[in-house]
Amino acid sequence: MNRLLFIDDAEDICMLFKETVEPLDGWVTDYASNPIEALKLIKVNRYQLVISDNIMPLMSGIEFFLLLKHENLQCQKILCTGDKDLKCAEADLILYKPFDFYLFKEIIYKSLRPQC
């Protein structure tokens, strides 16, 4: 089963994501309100795509992606941030806020397509 993990400490963003992106045909979407909760999910599920906010309590999205790299967990990673100058080598893509959720949806669909 294909899985997507969305991590954000803002409940309203999670709800907006859920309304915009779900349902993805053939995909299960899980949510975590912080990276520690996300790590628990990652230990029991295999995700093809992880989308994370950068500024969160306990650990930043960048720190979380570094941890995924250290644990050798292979998946596509999208980082969401309001900092237009931020760079992150661990992310496959950085989305700068504010962004259009319909454009966001298209980016997710493209990320979820099987890679050649």
Image (spheres, rainbow, N blue to C red):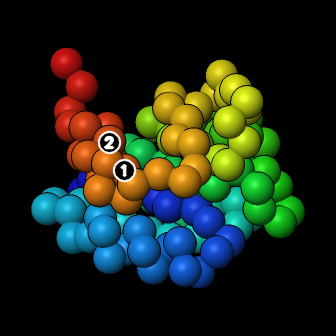
Q: Quadrant of the C terminus?
A: top left
Residue at the image point whose x is 59% and y is 81% from the top: 11
Instruction: Tell me residue 113's x, y (percent).
Output: 21, 37
Whether 12 is drawn above or below 115: the answer is: below
- Does residue 110 appear to the left or right of 64 in the view shown? left
Provide the residue designation for mark 2. 107
Q: What amino acid type is highlighted by mark number 1?
A: Phe
Few, some or many C-alpha atoms within 10 Å of disc 2 (few <14, some 14-19, many ≥20)?
some
* Near-viewer residue (104 or 74): 104
Q: Is residue 24 left or right of residue 82?
A: left
Q: Residue reaching furthest left?
A: 25
- Whole-percent x and y of residue 63? 78, 42
Q: Are marks 2 and 1 in contact (CB under 8 Å)?
A: yes
SS class, disc 2: helix
The answer for how far apart the CA atoms under marks 2 and 1 are is 5 Å
Out of 104 and 36, give the one closest to the viewer. 104
